[in-house]
Image: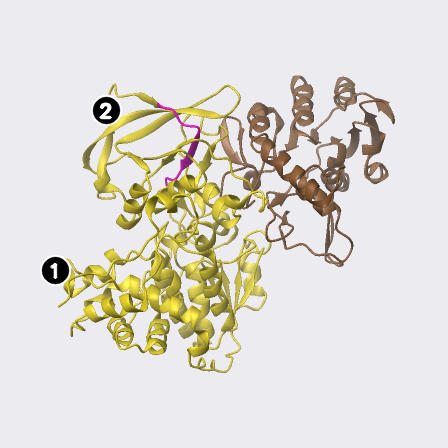
Chain colours: A brown, B yellow
Amino acid sequence: MVLTKDEKGERIPLTIADSDAHAGTVTIVFMEVGKTTRELGLLQTGDTIMSLTGPLGLPTHIENYGTVVCVAGGFAVAPVMPIARAMKQAGNKVISILGARNKELIFWEDELRSVSDKLIVTTDDGTYGRKGLVTEPLKEILESCEKIGLVVAIGPSVMMKFCAKTTQPFGVKTIVSLNPVMVDGTGMCGCCRVVVGGQTKFACVDGPDFDAHQVDWDLLAARQRTYVEEEKQALESWQCRCGKYS
Amino acid sequence: MNLNRVQMPRQEAAARAKNFKEVALGYTPEMAAEEAGRCIQCPKRPCVAGCPVNIDIPEFIKAVREGKMAEAVTVLKSKNALPGICGRVCPQETQCEEQCTLLKQKASVAIGRLERYVADWERQNKAAMPPVAPLPSPTGKKVAVIGSGPSGLTTAAELAKKGHTVTIFEALHVGGGVLMYGIPEFRLPKEIVQNEINFVKSLGVELVLDAVIGKCDTIDEILTEGYDAVFLGTGAGLPMFLNIPGENANGIYSANEWLTRTNLMKAYLFPDYDTPLKVGKRVAVIGGGNVAMDAARCALRLGAQEVYIVYRRSEAELPARREEVENAMEEGIIFKFLTNPTKFLDDGKGWVTGMECVQMELGEPDVSGRRRPIVKQGSEFVMNIDTVVVALGTTPNPLIAATTAGLKTTGYGTVVADETNCKTVKDKVWAGGDIVTGAATVISAMGAGKRAAADIDTYLKRQ
């Protein structure tokens, strides 16, 4: 989905974590990082936002691959959830790995467990679950005798990049969900250009799912840094105005 | 005969290159009366046929001359629902004014400036206008218009005036299409665009925003939801890139992104508005059309020190409106003709830092009728720039065609539709504007909207 909080707001893409057609709701989970996400975090039930559009992009391809490993980095457990659930419903054995920096950032653990045959939880600092990065249990699974049909990895770009590097020697197909900067989200501006297999693609309409082994990760990381200064400026200026330092 | 065309007062070049306020300031009542008085009201009236929507030009000009402003508005708006926009962005010099009887004396009546004057008068004097004629009773027929740019707004307005129930579906969070995201504030103030949209809504048209047809709903789903006809006015919003090495470096934008951030999201007001735009010191805009001029003039106003238009043909072949080229030159934009980029260089940290170019020379005309640019061997050189805007043109976003069974498209991605009545090969579906012609003008999109509305109306009355 692409949403805009108010007339002066920016358009930002966030993934649908869940939806209820009868109730007419969509569930979106986001990390409070900059000005817009912190403003959204201050909203209360009953508040409104100016604009919400979607679903945009191509849906994740669901198929019976046999066994699927779903790797979720931090709050990206939100977009992983519906994929894990759909893979399970399609007859896959689902092994999920949920990793975060520390215990406080572990989210939707029970939800992910409920749609997985097996769940491994990791924290970088060992304050919860197994100490280490998600790539460690991922590598162990691939090294075991179990035949893995597909790996789905969603999280911060660097995490997805290292999951791709981990699965590549094993030749296991790996899908990632790319998150470049976006403006319209409908294919009109090219801000979200990524290079996959040497070709320029628009993540908003050709993705967000792409073959992880074909992605130019360095380019994605560089383009994601385009507005680092402006993001800092916007956040600081907002925090000054609201007197909020968090 | 008065052969002295009244000049349009404009903001002075050095000052206006630093602000986003409108460049053309508009005629005073005295200027308008004087210019209107120059029209000799010739019996042949060739100007009317030169207008894509056939405005009754001599009639509205006569009303201005006689000070009958409300009448001028009524005459103008009977044919053109968006005169405040057309008066500003139409290329009248190749349309009505090119047909003017006085052209032979190099003194065409400034029809566009008068149109703008009348539209602006109406906006500022709403209370002085007679009440609008009531709409006919509802026909009970429903039409879905996809896209709220000039073709969609015109189609919707014309159909609403005939009593049909119209819903416009717009993908973005504001209506207007290129009028809002493409054409800059200093050429077309957004307040005027909103005013025109409000007029269309006042006719009973419903505008649904955030509706990406092809994603949220398909055309076929819309037809099963009780709409009797559909008009496709989704424009040409897919940007073209050069496809040369280094084009994905930071600091290289499509003109769509550059203009959308600036005009639609008001990046020039960052951080008051949240959307930023990174503008370097030396900006190169690749292309020579109106969009390239707009992008270059935005770059100046956004704080660039040097702005270049880099165009592979010569000045004579520039497709942009002459008026906009002159405005750009006056504002200090540097034109590098017969120049084509071949590669972008970056600084090792992912930012563009230079552009390798070659010089061109002109050969025989190509399919567009313009002389073909040929690379001059051994002419390679490097331009030091830190921002690039690629303004080569746009084609239709493939989403509609990809999700609509039975539509015929061309190799360029445009939808095939009849020129006279805008009918596509798909039952109950019409199309007009840039989605059919490729990127063109606001007024030609409006002309298509009128033709489509007339044909849709005929069709609905037969049902």
Q: Is residue A67 something that shows in the picture? A: no
Q: Secondary structure at mark 2?
A: loop
Quadrant in the rendering for residue A170:
top right
- Residue that numbered label 2 is attached to: B376
Q: Residues within 10 Å of mark 1 (few under 14, many from 20)?
A: few
Residue B240 position within the rendered picture, expressed as x and y whole percent measured from the top left: 41, 39
Q: Chain of mark 2?
A: B
Residue B286 position within the rendered picture, expressed as x and y whole percent measured from the top left: 36, 35
- Judge from the rendering whether residue A114 lies leftward or rightward of residue A190; answer left or right: right
Q: Residues within 10 Å of mark 2 (few under 14, many from 20)?
A: some
Q: Is residue B386 above or below residue A143?
A: below
Q: Is residue B451 above or below residue B322?
A: below
Residue plotted at (60% across, 46% down) = A11
- Judge from the rendering whether residue A11 lies leftward or rightward of residue B454; answer left or right: right
On whether residue B385 falls in the magenta region, the answer is yes
- Judge from the rendering whether residue B65 lies leftward or rightward of residue B415; answer left or right: left
Q: Secondary structure at mark 1?
A: helix
The answer to whether the residues at label 2 and label 1 have Cβ atoms under 8 Å apart is no
Residue B117 position within the rendered picture, expressed as x and y whole percent measured from the top left: 34, 66
- Residue type at numbered disc 2: Lys
- Point out the stretch of residues depicted in magenta: B383-392
Q: Chain of mark 1?
A: B
How many numbered marks does the figure carry?
2
Quadrant in the rendering for residue B300:
top left
Residue plotted at (33% across, 48% down) = B12
Give the label on residue B255, or none.
none
- Judge from the rendering whether residue B9 lies leftward or rightward of residue A7; answer left or right: left
Residue A93 position within the rendered picture, expressed as x and y whole percent measured from the top left: 78, 33
- Residue that numbered label 1 is attached to: B104
On whether residue A103 falls in the magenta region, the answer is no
